């Protein structure tokens, strides 16, 4: 990363941050007692960055055409802002919230519709249909839909935080098609990894989150000019958490059953894709 400039603490950097993401200029802001420091990931983008900074200082429009900031009477960010800055990532978050709300209203009906296989109860026992039969009957959405099931507020909040953190970065730097592909492939891969263990009642976006972690980490390490960045301590924390939930101690302290195989499967998918795309970036 290359240091560009320092800004006072009372500077509103949000419009500049949004514009940098919209222009896909790899960057990072750090904060200290003196203010904010702007870092540039790729020196080849320095000219574009300096031009954007000059227009920002003059008060000119800095968002690309078609991505103008949406005004808000209170001066706060519009609720629609995430959808034009990172539409796919925001849509995944919104869909997860909608499913969570439907689960609160309709309960097990939603789970039965979105679980990896159709579920039912017969004589007090859980009855399931094999995945192959479900797919043959046209229920192909079940390969991905468990990723949108969350079984508590903490489960939902943490998964959405990591999805937004990693997904927005990928979508800003590589576009909506790339993050859509990553969510689909890693979501299906994580779900199949968990189903392979014989588990049918599971859900959550954590498998996708670990895939995005692996992807961003490899891109930042193997192709630093790409603009990707993830704090090393965050990588250590998330990997440590994954190992912790694999132990029996996690259940005894109230974390319940965790889809560990989905975490591992998602991470494996993210690392494979991260290696492939970072190699392409290095060759370019």
Image: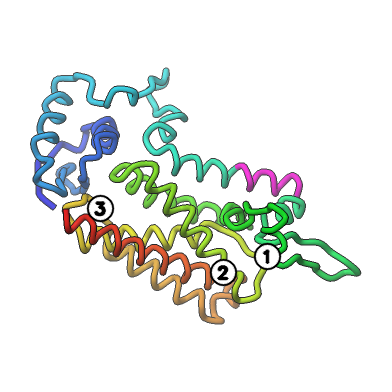
* First in sequence: mark 3 vs mark 2: 3
Which residue is denoted by mark 3 in the rendering? 228
At 75% across and 65% down in the image, what residue appears? 129
* First in sequence: mark 3 vs mark 1: 1
Which residue is denoted by mark 1 in the rendering? 132
Q: CA distance from mark 1 to mark 2?
A: 21 Å
**Left or right, residue 189 beside residue 232:** right
Q: CA distance from mark 3 to mark 2?
A: 28 Å
Which residue is denoted by mark 2 in the rendering? 259
**Neighbourhood count class around disc 1 (C-alpha, 10 Å): few under 14, some 14–19, many 20 upward:** few
Residue 65 position within the rendered picture, expressed as x and y whole percent measured from the top left? 29, 22
* The magenta stretch spans residue 104: yes
Q: Quadrant of residue 44?
A: top left
Q: Secondary structure at mark 2?
A: loop
**Neighbourhood count class around disc 3 (C-alpha, 10 Å): few under 14, some 14–19, many 20 upward:** many
Q: CA distance from mark 3 to mark 1?
A: 38 Å
Residue 80 position within the rendered picture, expressed as x and y whole percent measured from the top left? 45, 29
Q: Secondary structure at mark 1?
A: helix
Residue 252 position within the rendered picture, expressed as x and y whole percent measured from the top left? 60, 77
* First in sequence: mark 1 vs mark 2: 1
Residue 224 position within the rendered picture, expressed as x and y whole percent measured from the top left? 18, 57
At 53% across and 60% down in the image, what residue appears? 188
Q: Nearer the viewer, mark 3 or mark 1?
A: 1
Q: Are marks 1 and 2 in contact (CB under 8 Å)?
A: no
Q: Which residues are magenta?
A: 98-106
User: Is residue 48 positioned above or below 258 on the image?
Assistant: above
């Amino acid at each position: 990363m290359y240091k560009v400039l320092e800004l006072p603490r009372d500077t509103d950097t949000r419009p500049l941050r949004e514009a940098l993401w919209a222009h896909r200029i790899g960057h990072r802001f750090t904060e200290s007692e003196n203010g904010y420091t702007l870092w540039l990931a790729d020196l080849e983008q320095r000219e574009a960055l300096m031009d954007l900074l000059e227009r920002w200082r003059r008060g000119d429009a800095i968002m690309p055409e078609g991505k103008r900031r949406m005004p808000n009477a209170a001066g706060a960010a519009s609720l629609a802002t995430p959808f034009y800055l990172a539409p796919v990532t925001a849509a995944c978050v919104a869909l997860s919230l909608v499913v969570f709300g439907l689960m609160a209203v309709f309960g097990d009906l939603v789970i039965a519709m979105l679980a990896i296989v159709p579920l039912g109860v017969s004589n007090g026992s859980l009855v399931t249909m094999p995945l192959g039969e479900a797919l043959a009957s046209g229920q192909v959405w079940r390969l991905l839909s468990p990723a949108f099931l969350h079984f508590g507020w903490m489960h939902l909040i943490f998964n959405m935080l990591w999805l937004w953190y990693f997904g927005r970065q990928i979508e800003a730097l590589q576009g909506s098609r790339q993050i859509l592909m990553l969510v689909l492939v890693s979501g299906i891969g994580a779900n199949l990894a968990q189903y392979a263990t014989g588990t049918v009642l599971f859900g959550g976006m954590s498998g996708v989150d670990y895939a995005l972690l692996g992807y961003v980490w490899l891109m930042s390490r193997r192709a630093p000019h790409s603009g990707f960045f993830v704090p090393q301590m965050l990588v250590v924390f998330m990997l440590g958490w994954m190992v912790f939930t694999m132990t029996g101690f996690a259940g005894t302290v109230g974390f319940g059953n965790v889809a560990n195989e989905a975490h591992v499967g998602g991470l494996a998918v993210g690392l494979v894709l991260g290696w492939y795309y970072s190699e392409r970036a290095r060759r370019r």
